[in-house]
Amino acid sequence: MAGQWLSVTDINFKCQILALGVVAIIIYDFIRSKRLPLRSTRLFGFFLAMGAFNLVTDIVTYYTLLNYKLVPPVLNRVLHILFIGSIELMPAILFLYVFYLYGIRKSFRKWQVALFVIPFILAAVGSVIAPIYYHVDEHGAYSYGPMVYIMYASIAVYIVCVYALLLCKSKKHYHSDVIADYRKGRITVAVGLGIWIAVALIQFITKYILISSMGISLMLLYIYLSFENPKRYADEETDTLNRRAFHIMIPEMLARSGKFWLLNFTIDDNEQISKSMGYDQMKVILRTVAERLKTAVPGARFYHSRSNTLSMFVTDREEVDALLKRAGSANFDIEYGAGAFTPQYHITVMECPKYGETPDEIYDTLDYTLTHHHHHENGKVFWIDENTIKDKNYRKQVLAVLTKSVNDRAFNVVYQPIYSTAEKRFASAEALVRLQDCGKLGFISPEIFIPIAEQQGMIAEIGSIVFEKVCSFAAENRLWEKGIRYIEVNLSGMQSVDPSLPAQLSSVMQKYGIDPKFINLEITETASIDGGELLDMNMKRLRSLGCHFSMDDFGTGYSNLAQMAKVRFELVKLDKSLIWPAFGENPEEPMVILNSCIAMILQLGSHIVAEGVETKEQAQFLAEHGVHYLQGYFYSKPVPGEVFLEKLSAQISC
């Protein structure tokens, strides 16, 4: 019997020491790793500390219990109160941990406070005053009595509360990273707590085999490895915290009910760097920038929030100014090859919750500033303000109108007549899309809704709607019988490289009986350069049908003469930015450029359309120098279809 008693005791001590060693390793790794400053993470740290304290008291109380004849009864009782109290506190901490997980919930309600506090107070008081009994025999030792039963009752109450909380789903909308992690966290806690319960039940049944310590260590180890491991938030590319960590911190910061500032350090020329130096070099540059920032702002937590952006959270306004000053004066010269260069960057500052009360509002505003604000001055600081939010909200409203208009096919098409210098009349027109909101937005400029449509992937569908409306209008009014040789229809860059484009356009033209020669497709100069083989293939197929092409916006700064020689355009449209300076205050050099461009295009055998003609002087000069077609306000602004028809009728009657 004595041998069996020693064997059980030996097993219990080894289990307790092993469990304490496991928790000590977890605590060491937890302390030395980069952690998110989440309330739930801090509570998990406290949970680890309480687990370690519980395991220490477990070992001590087991030793004093085995040597109860040598230990004063008061000391034995005090140690058991500490041991049992730490066990009672652990599920209470776990309840708080789940409650504050990722800022899903901001604060307790009164009934939740009562639910959390009352069971612990009752258990604590009961543990102090209730009796406890000790059993020691040749099989081993264990404690029992009212104090132990109160402990079990307290644990049971909190376990029920924890599982009830785990089953509750947040009604708020968060980033997908937060939702996925929150779901994983709930499952992890449920499984970890289940492990502890299973081990505790085994101990309750066996009595002599004290393995609750193993249950605690296994629960902590499982939660740590599966969910709370700080390495999940490490960004290897920049040695900062990763994008997931950034998305998790947003609701956490909002849940703290205090103001904070979100600072974003963005590299503006990341695309150029990737193209010229390669993506791997871009990662090296971003890592170097992160290291310089951490040196300039010691102790700050940076998050790799976007591919070209490092972000940080600051809770003090004066500290914001100090950080901006230090970051702005930091040296970002980076060695490359035999030389060095400085990446172009800007810093965005956003005060929350003033300009972002929810995670979605913050993301929308950040995306908007990155997309729509160009920072020409290196190191410029851009403060998000009321005008930023107003402009962002306007574009959001435009997107809603745009989406509805696409679904309803509710776009207007206007026509800007094009004057033939040879025939002295309107011989063609350019079809232009317009968007009108019946509500408070009214007329929405194409310069606003076209880029939004391109960003949202709607531009191809809009182009399809416009093309069908043009064909329908031309067929209904038989424009070719009114002297119109062709109608110009714009193709977006996305449309022009769509393999299904020829079949789509051919189907619409056949539907309305339109001769393909009546359609002239405008492709912007940029699209003609970037389109590659897909554009070449589409142009060949559409030309085989009879369609013609014109290069739009020639002279806007992207001109590629080699492309013009490679892909012949029936028409080349001179942009107004090439024409207007030749009639301005210092016309000498612009006039030389204009004359050279006209002569070159004519030698290539293409016809010329001059856009933006607004004065008689411009019209006469361009006509005298061989320009075939003139388009601009001097002749007519874009007009609705019925007005365009009236102009044609007036022209015929004259």
Image: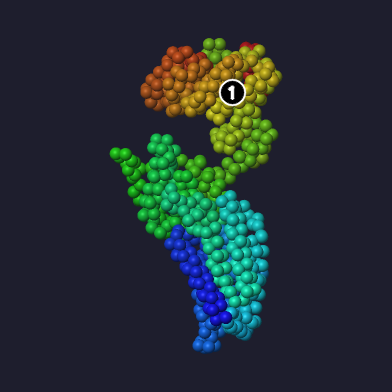
Residue type pointed to by label 1:
Val
Q: Quadrant of residue 284?
A: top left
User: x and y percent of residue 88 in the render?
Assistant: 59, 74
Which residue corresponds to mark 1?
489
User: x and y percent of residue 241 in the render?
Assistant: 46, 53
Q: Residue at x 56, y 34 (%)?
A: 454
493 or 162: nearer the viewer: 162
Q: How many numbered marks have been drawn onto this rendered protein structure?
A: 1
Q: Residue at x 40, y 18 (%)?
A: 596
Q: Residue at x 33, y 45 (%)?
A: 333
Q: Quadrant of residue 96?
A: bottom right
Judged from the image, the secondary structure of the residue bearing numbered disc 1 is strand
- Left or right: residue 81 compared with residue 348: right
Q: Residue at x 63, y 27 (%)?
A: 464
Q: Quadrant of the C terminus?
A: top right
Q: Quadrant of the N terminus?
A: bottom right
141 or 80: nearer the viewer: 141
- Left or right: residue 631 compared with residue 294: right
Q: Residues within 10 Å of mark 1 (few under 14, many from 20)?
A: many
- Name above or below for residue 400 compared with residue 605: below
User: x and y percent of residue 349 in the render?
Assistant: 47, 51
